[in-house]
Image: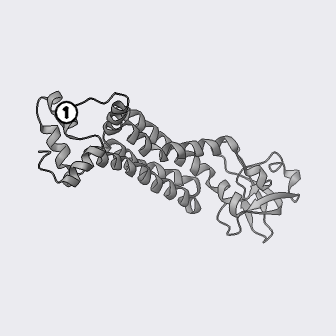
Amino acid sequence: MFAGLSPAKQRTFEEVGLGLPELRRIAEEDGHTRRVRRILDIDGGKPEDTTSVWAWVRLPLIALVGVVGCLASTYLIDRYALLVGLAWSMAVIWVAVKAPLWRGGPVVRVLAVAAYVVLVWLGSQQADKWYLQVRGQETTVTYAKAVDLGSHGVTTLYCRVKLPDGSIRQVFRNDKWCTDETMVGTRAQAVIDPAGHYRPFLGRKSDLDDGVIDYLCLGAAVVLLLTPVAAAALSPASTRARNRSGRPSEAGV
């Protein structure tokens, strides 16, 4: 079978550690040649390990689409954008399940899916703050009367402020003064969205920095992007290459 391949294809297989000696070892180990035939025939002769690594590359790409879609959705539906990210997680899980399972494969799958969930879960909560850090403008607002959005007899006050253009908006997060009725009409510092989509944030831009959550999201993004690298390192071809480099060369092979 191997001898019937073109010299170029033979070199391609040898470069990824699937030369004739390795194929013979696989056939002897299995007791048949079905796996060897599958390796040689897959994708028109492309080595199975190379093709399999590309299957792992799809995982962070599909996840990236979901993360971007989730964050962009916050512009229209605020924190309900989390539902968009969770719905897309079905596609991420499907791609992860379809990726070839090697030694360490289950761990890589779980880490990749977990990293995606962290990104959409925390990202949907932080997207407005990230946007205001980049596009927000610091300005002076005036405390307005807080609104009670509680239910079943429970009082839940949400602060509102009057913007320079005269509009009244609910704030991103209450501060310790805004629910006090005596503060109505008092001026305060806030970061606002010039386009008016995201809610005002009481404080300055420097107060928007949430180090722990930001670092968690950054770490999750790194884990997701390194998924193909981990998959390539755990692939059979990579393992065989390391084993060969650790063995003295044998004459007559």
Horizontal side of residue 178 vs 12, given as left or right? right
Give the farthest residue toward the bottom: 165
Report if residue 181 is visible in the image: yes
Q: Left or right: where does residue 196 sit relative to residue 7?
A: right
Q: Residue at x 81, y 45 (%)?
A: 176
How far across and down, in percent of the image, does residue 60 sit?
44, 50
Residue at horizontal 79 percent and vertical 58 percent from the top: 190
Please tell me whether residue 114 is drawn above or below residue 76 in the rendered image.
Answer: above
Specify whether 132 is left or right of 8. right
Residue 87 pos. (x, y %): 43, 51
Mark 1 highlights which residue?
Answer: 26
Relative vertical location of residue 197 with respect to residue 129 in this rendering, above or below: below
User: Closest to the observer: 229 or 23?
Assistant: 23
Residue 199 in view, yes or no: no
Q: Quadrant of the N terminus?
A: top left
For the C terminus, which image quadrant? Answer: top left
